[in-house]
Amino acid sequence: MTKEELKAKLTEFNPTAVFDEAGEWLNVSIEASEWLPLAQQLRNSAELDFDFLFSVTGVDWKTHLTVVYHLRSIKHGHIIVVKAKCDRAKPEIETVCNIWKTAELNEREAYDLFGIIFLNHPDLRRLFLTDDWEGWPLRKDYVDEINIIKL
Amino acid sequence: MQYEEIATTEEGNLVINVGPQHPATHGVMHLVITMNGETILNVEPHLGYIHRSIEKMCESLSYRQFIYSTSRMDYLSSHINNHGCALAVEKGLQIEVPERAKVIRILMDELTRIASHVLWWGAMAMDVGALTPFFHAFRERELINDIMEETCGARLTMNYMVPGGVMTDLHPNFVKKVKEFVAFFRTKIDEYDTLVTYNVIFQERMKNVGVISAADAVSFGCTGPVLRACGVKSDIRKLAPYDGYEKLNFEEPLETAGDSYARYLVRMRELRESLSIIDQLIDNIPEGDFQAKTKAVLKLPKGEFYSRVETARGEFGVYIISEGGLTPYRIHFRSPGFANLSCLNHIAKGQKIGDLVAMMGTLDLVIPDIDR
């Protein structure tokens, strides 16, 4: 599907979604609470068939956090980028590891580095850092006392 | 007594640790394995022993500097990692790369792929008990390292690809040496096949071990030879060609069994495809600049840039978010090893502990690439 067709199709599911077509791929911005139903539609609709989640990551925008999902359909070859906005003080979003199994480790990484809570995740623990680590290193307000490469 | 209490769970299952220092993990990775007798019930990877938070470091490095940190992720694919980063920056600045640089990049990428697969082949055979291939593999890999050393000045962390092209021109010996290597290596692949591929003992250890279905492999985000061994076309060089791969004539090797042997075969066939790519280019390196003219200080416009390349392990992605400053606002690296590792528990469940190395070996895990 082209960007236009994807946009038309997604507007049916989610009329409040905000689209950005400036980049290489279609970007969809939604609220965190809207993510799970949209994810199910993206995966289960035969026309969309987004079966390959190739990147999950967080971004700290200082006022809020976003979780960015990059999805591709192996069959159709189209790509979509979904950005779910989370509250910074209480960053909660539903897990999608029942839909795409790769999300389980990737969400743990986002939790580890951004402190994003993935609701109903089977095993939400620190991944790279030690269990007693304090703070969320990739957030912009994280104080890194031993940063040796400050510009 | 205390040891038994720790090691044995209530149901009488045994918990053992593989790593973080273990010869079969080829790096500092820690697996906690729950077993019943010799049957694996659960494999839980514990990561982070070599986590340097490269993504955080990149936030305070300029667009020229951050590329060098990616050589330290997948150190066997450093050229290709650098290539992916250079492409992302070029996308942001809309730099047109000279033809000569594009061809040099592809030649370097394919030599890297061969070096990486050769090392994997030796280590893989060693993991399942054949020591000799390891020495064969290192003999051939040494030749590639020598070629790299002459042109790039490095043998492992190349740092050769820069935004706009490559850092220096090719060494005068490059073409001659690569031709010699390709002719020599062609005979060696056949030797590899007779030594290992057709070996009945090796085949018995690899076939029907670590089977994964195409649907599961896609769901786990596997890419590269792991996914192609399930018959799914996923080569970025074909799906979204970059720097002239679209002009080349090469195949994407596919297998359908999805087991360790299929992953092995895909990589062996990729070696031959890489040689064929080098053959097509080595006599046709265009004259001209090896680098486009760029500003000394690079500033990406506000926006998001994502580039994808095919490393020896699969799809490597670079996701740059720029706010228009001198440094990236956020960088994320989509590492192929991280996704390929996530399927380990799935394929290992119900298999014997002795087969674990045959599964891990064919996933071709490079730990710094997973931990970043």
Image (cartoon, coloured by chain):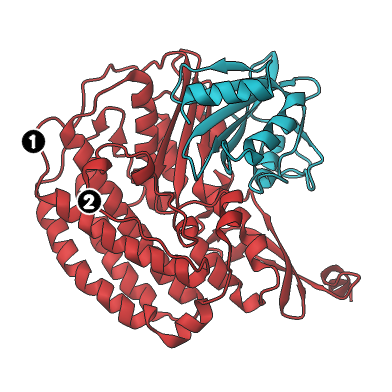
The image shows residue A41, relative to residue A124, as above or below, that is above
Residue occupying image coordinates x 37% and y 82%: B198
The spot of residue A19 in percent (x, y) is 57, 17
Q: Residue type at mark 1: give it.
A: Glu
Residue occupying image coordinates x 50% and y 61%: B230
Residue occupying image coordinates x 45% and y 20%: A23
Residue occupying image coordinates x 44% and y 39%: B70
The image shows residue A44, relative to residue B118, as above or below, that is above
- Relative to A151, is B108 on the left or the right? left
Q: Chain under label 1?
A: B
Occupied quadrant, residue A118: top right
Tell me the cyan chain: A
State the residue position of label 2: B249
Front position among marks 2 and 1: 2
Local secondary structure at mark 1: loop
Split into 4 quadrants, where in the image is the N terminus of chain B? bottom right
Q: Residue type at mark 2: give it.
A: Asn
Give the numbered dot on residue B287: 1
CA neighbours of label 1 inside 10 A, class few (<14), some (14 to 19), many (20+):
few
Split into 4 quadrants, where in the image is the C terminus of chain B? top right
Tell me the red chain: B
